[in-house]
Amino acid sequence: MRLDGAKITLVDARAEHLYQPGLSLVAAGLKPAGYTVSNTTDWLPQGITLVAEHAAAIDPIAKTVATTGGQSIPYDFLVVAPGLVLDHDAIEGFSLDMVDQNGIGALYAGPHYAAKTWEAASKFT
Ligand SMILES: Cc1cc2nc3c(=O)[nH]c(=O)nc-3n(C[C@H](O)[C@H](O)[C@H](O)COP(=O)(O)OP(=O)(O)OC[C@H]3O[C@@H](n4cnc5c(N)ncnc54)[C@H](O)[C@@H]3O)c2cc1C
């Protein structure tokens, strides 16, 4: 193994892991909202350290990640995978409080809205 003996650290403040593909099943009425939510720690392989804070800054010269809690974590190799932040306000005429009214759904917005999307679909059918 090329990284045999590597010390791996995950920096992420989100305690809840969201199984995003499962949102489709919630919005289709096949699973309850809670099906998509688990603990991030449930998925950590042995030997990986979780720093439950957000990254605030990266210094690629000093090779450190500063966390929102004030830690400075040194690294040899850094993988940055922050995902996306959905911007529902950018959709003209739409807001999340419309979900479940007039046949409107928004399953990407999270488990709560995926369940409301199923409610909207149920009313329609
Ligand atoms: C409804 C739906 C259905 C989907 N179906 C499929 C499917 O069938 N097959 C498939 O392959 N994909 C599917 N996807 C896509 C898949 O779920 C995403 O592509 C995947 O979850 C993205 O993973 P990610 O790690 O890039 O981002 P995320 O899962 O969003 O994780 C990003 C993480 O970065 C953390 N983060 C952000 N900023 C910081 C920071 N400053 N410091 C520390 N941590 C930070 C966040 O807290 C988060 O935990 C689906 C998505 C949706 C919404």
Image (cartoon, grey):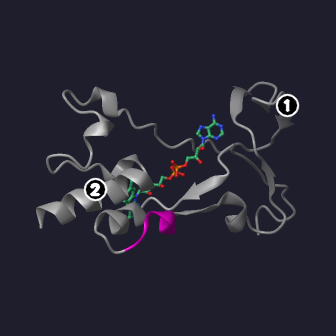
Circle on res. 72 = 1
State the residue in front, 39 or 1. Answer: 39
Q: Does label 1 or label 2 sit earlier along the sequence?
A: 1
Q: Identify which residue is drawn at 40% across, 37% down.
A: 86
Residue position for label 2: 117
Mark 1 and mark 2: Cα distance apart in space: 42 Å
State the residue in front, 57 or 22. Answer: 22
State the residue in front, 88 or 120. Answer: 120
Which of the 4 quarters of the picture holds residue 89?
Answer: top left
- The rendered magenta stretch, by its main secondary structure, is classed as helix
Q: Identify which residue is drawn at 32% across, 38% down.
A: 96
In which quadrant is the C terminus drawn? bottom left
Q: Disc 2 marks which amino acid?
A: Thr
Q: Position of residue 10 (x, y in %)?
A: 73, 50
Circle on res. 42 = none
State the residue in front, 45 or 24. Answer: 24
Q: Position of residue 73 (x, y in %)?
A: 84, 36
Q: Identify which residue is drawn at 35% across, 69% down.
A: 25
Which region shows up in magenta? 31-36
In which quadrant is the N terminus drawn? bottom right
Q: Identify which residue is drawn at 32% across, 55% down.
A: 116
For mark 2, does the 10 Å Cα neighbourhood hold few (<14), some (14 to 19), or many (20 or more) residues? many
For mark 1, does the 10 Å Cα neighbourhood hold few (<14), some (14 to 19), or many (20 or more) residues? some
Q: Disc 1 marks which amino acid?
A: Ser
In the image, is residue 10 part of the stretch drawn in magenta?
A: no
> Secondary structure under badge 1?
strand
> Secondary structure under badge 2?
helix
* Residue 36, above or below 73: below
Q: Position of residue 56 (x, y in %)?
A: 70, 27
Q: Position of residue 81 (x, y in %)?
A: 58, 44
